[in-house]
Amino acid sequence: MVDESSYRQGGRVGVLALQGDVREHTALLERLGAEVVRVRRPEELARVGGLVIPGGESTVIDKLSRQFGLAQPIRDAIGDGMPVLGTCAGLIMLADSIEDAIEGQQTFGGIDVVVRRNAFGRQVESFEASLEVPLLGERPVRATFIRGPVVERLGPDATALAALEDGRVVAVEQGNLIGISFHPELDGEPRFHERFLDRVASRP
Ligand code: GLN
């Protein structure tokens, strides 16, 4: 069970609020007892001990984060070990390298993977799957995919947390960074957010 009080002591966390499903992440984090700041400016980033990068459209999040002067501060914070949870477009933003990017598209990076954008093609833009995620316990994760990416190549520094039945990796972790292809915030699946909040709480 979640010890909600420990998250309050763990400090505040941010949700990158440039574009995407900010509200759903905020609601889930608050339900878990976290204090949430919507991050649009470097000053807001400086006030949080961890960051969630929501799903949405990675090309837009990339463009706006550069326009808002947030891209480099986020990279620096990742370099300093700040815990970050990225879902869908958020995973793309955390990947060191992307395939099927638009011209000039950049990521924050930090996870040693190559991800492919829109990997499921037009026919299956959205679907649900039940995923085994041993690290999160026996109960499978109900996962909703919406034009999600997959991990094409996993570098030696990254660990796979979950894969589809065909073996394609859809959740990864590296140090304090967690990246997942799907949307637990839409399914009320709290365990990835709990893991993220545990990381935030255990930082000095
Ligand atoms: N296809 C989107 C992208 O490339 C991601 C979709 C999502 O976040 N739901 O950014």
Image: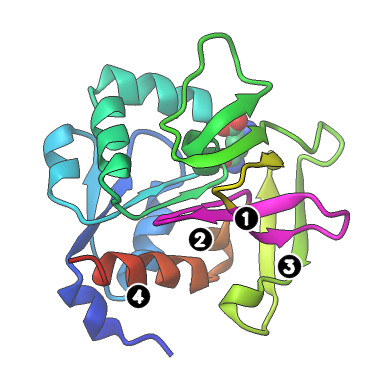
Instruction: Work out which residue is located at the far front of the displayed protein and give it.
Output: 156
Q: Which residues are magenta?
A: 159-181
- Give residue 4's position: percent from left, percent from top: 29, 83
Q: Which residue is mark 3?
A: 131
Please name the residue that numbered disc 2 is placed on: 185
Q: Is residue 156 above or below residue 32?
A: above
Instruction: Provide the secondary structure element on which disc 3 rests.
Output: strand
Marks 2 and 3, how far apart at CA: 15 Å
- In terms of sequence position, does the residue under pointer 1 or pointer 4 come before the other? 4
Q: Is residue 104 above or below residue 53?
A: above
Q: Residue at (69%, 32%) from the top-left corner?
A: 116
Label 4 CB-ligand 1 distance < 8 A: no
Image quadrant holding the C terminus, namely bottom left
Q: Mark 1 belongs to which amino acid?
A: Ala
Amino acid type at image mark 4: Leu
- Percent across and percent down for residue 102 are 60, 14
Q: Nearer the viewer, residue 176 or 129?
A: 176
Using the rendered view, name the quadrant where residue 162 is placed.
Answer: bottom right
The alpha-carbon separation of the residues under discs 1 and 4 comes to: 21 Å
